[in-house]
Image: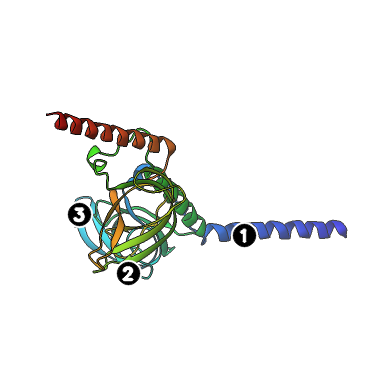
Amino acid sequence: MSLKKSSRAMVTAAIAVFLASAMAAGPLGAQGLPVITDEMLKQTVAALHVDVQTGRVAGITSSGPVAEVGAKIVDVLFGDYAAGEWISYSQRVEREYVKPAVSQRLLLFRRDGDRGTLVDADFSPAGRDALARQLAEFRRKTELLTGEMHVPDYLLRSGNNAVLHVEIQKSVPFDRGRSNLSATHTAIVRSAVQGDFKPGQSVEFIEKSRRNKRFEPPANAQRIVLLTYTKSVQDGQMKWWLHERVNYGYTEPGLKTLQSDVARVRAAQAEKAAQKASK
C-alpha cells in the first residue's frame, strides 16, 4: 500500500513540474526567442510586447508580398512608445497574411525606419524577462566611458563647466513643452574632475531628450557627466544642464583618462596665456 502511495506521489509531482514548466514557457505551440546578438541590438530602435489585432497584404515589393500588421502595445521594454498605443508595421508574407497562432508578440524594430522588424517572436514571460535582461546589459556596456575613449578637447576648455563622477539617486521625467520629455536627475557627487563640487555633495541637473512618450532611464546609475550652468527659458532660474555629448557610464580607467585630458587642456591653455602675456 505504501509503495502505491509513493508511486502516486511521484506521478503527481512529475505532473506538477511539467505544468509549471509549460506555464513558464508560455502558450502551447509558442516558439522561444531566436538568438539576439549585440549587432542586432545596435540596430534596434524599440523593443515591444504587443497584441496583434489586424493584418492585410498591403503591396508587392521586389522581394515579394508585404503585409501591414496592426497591434496594440502591451508593454515597452525599450523605445519611445507608450503602453496602450496602437501601431502598425510591415511584415513579409508568402501569399496571404495569416494571423499568428500566438497573437501576443515580442518585437524588435529596426533603427533605419523601414517599419520592419528585426525580431518577431511569440511572447512568453520568460522570453520577455530574458530580452529585458539582455537589453539592460547591452545598454550598460555601450554607455561606458572606457580608458581608450577621449572627450573632445573643445568640450573641456570652458572652466565654468563641471565635469563630475556622480551616482544618480532619482530621476523624474517631465514634459518641457510640446510633448518633449526631459528629466530632472538628483545625484550624489563621487568625485569632481572640474568644478566647485565636493564628494558626497548633492547636485540636481536636467537632461533634455528627443523623446515624446517615454523617457529611457539611465542604464548605469554611476555616471561621468559634463554640466553647464545656464538660465532656464521656462522659469528664468539658473540650473545645471547635462551636456548630451558627455554622459557616460562610469569606469575607473575612463575617469582617469578624462582627468588626464582635462589636465592636458588646462596646461595648454596656461602655456598659451603665458606666451600671449610675454609678447
Q: Circle 2: is it few (<14), some (14-19), or many (20+) Cα within 10 Å?
A: some
Real-space CA distance between mark 2 and mark 3, rounded to the nearest whole angstrom: 25 Å
In which quadrant will I find the N terminus? bottom right
Element marked by disc 2: strand
Residue 86: give its label.
Answer: 2
For badge 3, the amino acid type reads: Thr
Real-space CA distance between mark 1 and mark 2, rounded to the nearest whole angstrom: 33 Å
Dot 1 or dot 3: first in sequence order is 1
Image quarter of residue 272: top left
In which quadrant will I find the C terminus? top left
Q: How many marks?
A: 3
Residue 66, percent from left and from top = 25, 58
For badge 2, the amino acid type reads: Trp
Q: Nearer the viewer, residue 91 or 129?
A: 129
Question: Circle 3 sits on which residue?
Answer: 61
In the rendered structure, the answer to whether residue 35 lies left or right of residue 2 reads: left
Q: Nearer the viewer, residue 235 or 52?
A: 235
Label 3 near label 2: C-beta < 8 Å? no
Q: Nearer the viewer, residue 255 or 174?
A: 255
Real-space CA distance between mark 1 and mark 3, rounded to the nearest whole angstrom: 44 Å
Residue 120, percent from left and from top = 38, 55
Single out the residue that lies furthest toward the left.
279
Q: With respect to residue 104, does 189 lie above or below?
A: above
For badge 1, the amino acid type reads: Ala
Element marked by disc 1: helix
Q: Circle 1: is it few (<14), some (14-19), or many (20+) Cα within 10 Å?
A: few
Single out the residue that lies furthest toward the right.
1
Question: Circle 1 sits on which residue?
Answer: 20
Element marked by disc 3: strand
In the rendered structure, the answer to whether residue 84 lies left or right of residue 95 reads: right
Residue drawn at point x = 62 percent, y = 60 percent: 19
| Mark 1 vs mark 2: in front | 2
